[in-house]
Amino acid sequence: MTDYLNFTVKENESGVKIKQYLKLNARLSGRLIRGAAKDGRISVNGERVNLIYVLISGDIIRLNVVKKESQNIEPEPIDIDVAFEDNDIIVVNKQPGIVVHPTKNFATGTLANGLLYHFRKNNEDCIVRLVSRLDMDTSGLMLVAKNQFAHMALARDMKEASFQKCYTAVVHGKFTQKKGTIDLPIFRVGEGTVKRIIDERGQKSITHYEVIKEINGDSILSLKLETGRTHQIRVHLSHIGHPVYGDTIYCDQDDSELISRQALHATKLIFPHPRTGELIKLQTKLPMDIEKLIENIKNC
């Protein structure tokens, strides 16, 4: 793949301004179009044009997606498990115990620090654009865009049914309904806490679940998110009486002897590639600590 998006104007598309064409036909955001025009990254037939240029049939539009950018994050040599990578995106299999992005309490040692080091080592001049996030102690597949175009396209397509984020969780208790949907609003309790609750003041939140196995009175679930709220799976499952094993915020039981973090793993990721539209399907195995937890529950 190249650093450019190329479009050829068809006969029935002529007579419109390039700004309108890129917005409607190429499905690019107004922000991306304006920025690319300002930087001189849009050309027609090899010549730089402004956004009022009127297209004719056969015009060849070229947009450079590479933009000079910087990020106030220090690159650090952190091991990264890459599940998929090309010029536009990278998917990593995040390990538990690592923060995704620098915060006041975790200024270094984050996944973003490691990603920037990875980019620089490969001579890629891009910044970390998170498309999906995972809690510090949640493991699994995470999607990151390498340029503004890819980030825009993935954020747009995340609303489509073809975009799927699937998780596996080990939870307390057996379900009477082996398959169902939890549609309950999630609300942040206060500015000084990370805890969320079910409350009508909250954002609409939808989680689909299916029991894939029962073990000694507990359950292994497959979950698919329709929305992506902070702690969504953990809050929803706790509210219906099936908290995730090892969850120190939403589970009242002490599972520390069995697992040192919540037993939640982003197992599968399906999404249309931002440039080609091809469906990318990725899947990862459960990490060792969750496999060990399952074995210990079986032997209880």
Image (tube, helix red, strand yellow):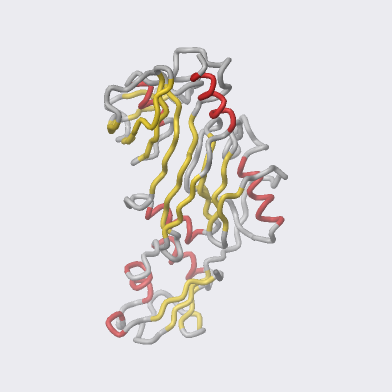
Q: Which residue is drawn at 57% across and 39% down?
A: 100
Q: Quadrant of the N terminus?
A: bottom right
The answer to whether 286 appears left or right of 179 in the picture is right
Q: Give the image quarter of residue 19.
A: bottom left
Determine which quarter of the picture holds residue 125: bottom right
Q: In this view, does 63 lie to the left or right of 235?
A: right
Q: Is residue 135 above or below residue 86?
A: above
Q: Which residue is drawn at 62% across and 29% down?
A: 105
Near-viewer residue (209 or 144) = 209
Point out residue 40 in the picture as x, y percentages from the top left corner: 53, 73
- In percent of width and height, residue 248 lies at 50, 19
In this rendering, is residue 126 above or below 81? below
109 left or right of 205? Answer: right
Looking at the picture, how far across and down is residue 173, in whole percent? Answer: 38, 18
Residue at image coords 56%, 65%? 66
Q: In the picture shown, does residue 185 fall above or below 251?
A: below
Image coordinates for residue 90, horizontal then vertical, percent: 56, 53
Q: Quadrant of residue 242?
A: top left
Q: Is residue 94 above or below residue 53?
A: above
Q: In this view, does 89 lie to the left or right of 10?
A: right
Residue furthest front in the image? 299
Q: How many labels does the image show?
A: 0
